[in-house]
Amino acid sequence: MQHPATALPSTTFTTSQVAGADRFDAWRSSVSVLFDATPVAPDAPLQDFQATVHAVHLGQLLLGDLHFGAQRFSRDDTRVAHDGLEHYLVQWYRSGGFTGRHGDDNELNVQAGDVVVFDMARTQHTVAQGSHVLSLIVPRKLGDAAFGSAGMAPHGTVLSGTSVFGGLLADHLDSVYRRLPSIGVEQADDVVHATLQMLAACLRPSMRTLAQAQGEMQAVTLERIQRHIALHLGTPLTPETLSQAFGISRYRLYQLFEPLGGVVRYVQQRRLQRAFQALSTPAYRRLRVADVAARLGFTSEAHFSRAFRATFGYTPSDVRAMSESAREGHHAAPVHITPASVEYADWLLGLMA
């Protein structure tokens, strides 16, 4: 197999590096950017719990190969209202499966071979068996384009592994994952385009093409800049640097961001939203408030705190304390934070363009 000139970024998490009694806490911290994970029962033995994640960043999508033991996953109303995640999650269950509910108590039953789609901006509660899952995380705008419209988002859609479209989508995901060692950064956008087309063919209610769904070139340019901002919040993102990076005039840049309140305001709001998410997520709990501010491009902690409070009505320390208190009300706060957990959380939140 030919190796690419520039390999795709990847990261691996495994509980095998943690003492048996602490493995579930390590896993819970790792997955906390997406779900609240709890044991299947209060007295469930956890010393033998095992989980691994191998995640690869395709630039606009995240593809992960997951093995995990039996557990509960949930996103309740409070979490959905506050963490700001709007991604779509497409999962192919190679083995295992789950039962549960989503949205307005709609029941779900996913078996080995099935593909399921979740809208992370909506609630869900599932009880999973030990499973092997291939998981694709799709940013909101790309997902809406592929699925046809935000109003018809397929939350809780299950494509049976025995159906034509379920089989086609599973085959595509499997093929992409197996070929990752030969896919480089240079080919990533083409792979993303092909994957979105396959999602569209299998899931969306209309036959509009991806190009039609994306709209005019102005919308495409805006999305590219928004994605760049989401991935580089810790770097200088002035109108001058953005104009230079994308080869457009500042006047054109201002026009693109005018409906969003202006480019400077947009950048600050994205930084503040990311800060709120970081302060609410266990994967970042070892970072001081000052560290969070610096990572997101704020040169003054005092300015960061004032802007944060003006936006959310709470100080950064208040948000962290409330998050810790809420977690302690459900279970002991996880203490095992790995570099892979932080890196994966950074990647996932960076998709939010």
Image: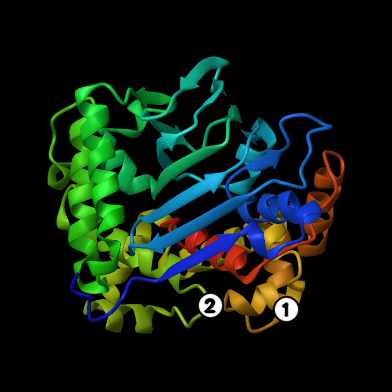
Residue 92 in percent (x, y) is at 38, 37
Find disc 1 in the rendering and name its residue.
301
Image point (13%, 30%), residue name: 207
Q: Quadrant of the N terminus?
A: bottom left
Residue 16 in percent (x, y) is at 65, 60
**Does 121 appear above or below 16?**
above
Numbered disc 2: secondary structure: loop
Image point (63%, 56%), residue name: 30
Q: Which of 233 and 263 is in front in this view?
A: 233
Pointers 1 and 2 in contact (CB under 8 A)?
Answer: no
Kindly identify the amino acid type of the residue bearing the numbered disc 2.
Gly
Observer able to see residue 269: no
Q: Which mark is residue 234?
A: 2
N-terminal label among 1 and 2: 2
Q: Quadrant of the C terminus?
A: bottom left
Residue 54 in percent (x, y) is at 47, 59
Image point (40%, 33%), residue name: 117
**Residue at the front extreme?**
48
Residue 332 in percent (x, y) is at 85, 48
